[in-house]
Image (cartoon, rainbow, N blue to C red):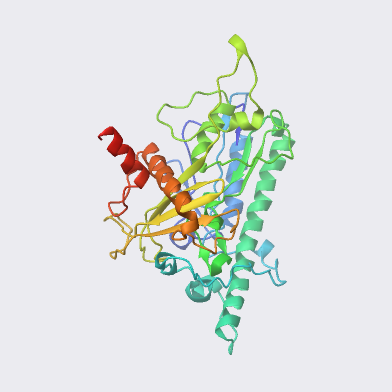
Amino acid sequence: MAHGRRAGPRPRGLRLLGRAHRAGGVPRPDVPVGDGPAHRAGYATDVITDLALRWLDSLEGDDPWCLLVWHKAPHRPWEPDEAHADLYREPIPVPATFTDDYATRTSSARRAAMRIAEHLTAEDLKVDPPPGLTYDELALWKYQRYMEDYLRCVASVDDNVGRLTAALRERGELDDTLLLYSSDQGFFLGDHGWFDKRFMYEESIRMPFLLSYPRALDGGRVHDGIVTNVDLARTILDAAGVEPHPRMQGRSFWPELAGHHGTGDHADPPPDPPARGFYYRYWEHDDVFHKAPAHYGYRDDRYKIVYFYNDGTGLAGTGPFTYPGEWELYDLERDPEELHNVADDPAYADVRARLEVDLWHAQAAVDDRPHPGQPVPAGIAALAGRTGT
């Protein structure tokens, strides 16, 4: 949240220790205060909001301020608080892709240890399953347990976001506050039989994102362009009329929300052009918990290409095993659920060739480097041959 008041002299945050590191429900979250931490009783999501509201109430004057509130609640092992413990008792609908057999996917995707049927732990489930269930019945039982607690934790986040919004309204500042509600990534909720994230599939890379600034923006609109979390900082600065640092990556999509106005000497500076696509990379190859493969890729408004380079390259947190590189390609218009990998389909040969070049350029634009196992795209090689480089 950003508003017309000054922030404090230094950032302050909340750190969760031990089991609290991963939990939404934490009996004694550890809060850095002054020269050392202080334990606070209560549910972590509530405590974080309490501290945010206390800081908000301490403000005086009309200087600009910025308040960042980060909740851990949707993370494993999904421990709801008592206020939400009885929600979602009715059966939760199962995603259409829950029984995805990965028939056309690469072996890279199949190695991931993220299956609800097989990789949720006793700590995740919290109660033992009933005896006598078949494999398929047990998978559905685990899905219901997982989703019940996950949604209960998120309900607490929703309630506490409501507390913040109500506080701004009571202070008469809601209309003048740029309020953003988002996440650091998407999450598999039984889609393709998975939990967790990491992959470049849609459920993982799509993030919830709501934005409110009544004084500057009309409500009830949908922005359907490509926006990434790397764009948020520049967009916030643009909305506040602050120049970004020249080294900042991303682009401002504020003009697309607020409109681009002016002509002649009084014209606004031209906005950044709409994004044609975006680059994604996951580096934590073969990690001890999820065994997800290292990969990178490029997605535009219709297609997605992914290269699983399957190599930790010696980085901390990666596993010791490497595997041959593999490609996946999806036509999101015809196959929005990404069930049909068409990387080797002759009908998509031209699309793949174009996307390999787009991926190469998008990677270079952020000063990343392709894995040595990835061949130079034919379009790049042909261009280099013509220019002698």
Looking at the rendering, which quadrant does residue 247 occupy? top left
Residue at point 59%, 31% (across, down): 254
For residue 60, above or below residue 360: above
For residue 278, above or below residue 108: above
Is residue 189 toward the left or the right of residue 165 in the image?
Answer: left
Residue at point 39%, 55% (across, down): 307
Report x, y in % for residue 88: 70, 67
How many labels, in total?
0
Residue at point 59%, 72% (across, down): 143
For residue 379, above or below residue 123: above
Is residue 92 toward the left or the right of residue 66 in the image?
Answer: right
Report x, y in % for residue 264: 61, 11
Whether residue 145 can be seen here? yes
Report x, y in % for residue 213: 68, 33
Is residue 94 toward the left or the right of residue 41 in the image?
Answer: right
Quarter of the image with the N terminus is: top right
Whether residue 59 can be seen here? no
Report x, y in % for residue 367: 35, 39
Q: Camera-side residue: 208 or 81?
A: 208
Spot the residue most to the top. 265
Quarter of the image with the C terminus is: top left
Q: Camera-side residue: 272 or 169?
A: 272
Looking at the rendering, which quadrant does residue 108 occupy? bottom left
Residue at point 74%, 40% (across, down): 220
Looking at the rendering, which quadrant does residue 66 occupy? top right
Spot the residue most to the bottom. 132
For residue 127, above or below residue 107: below
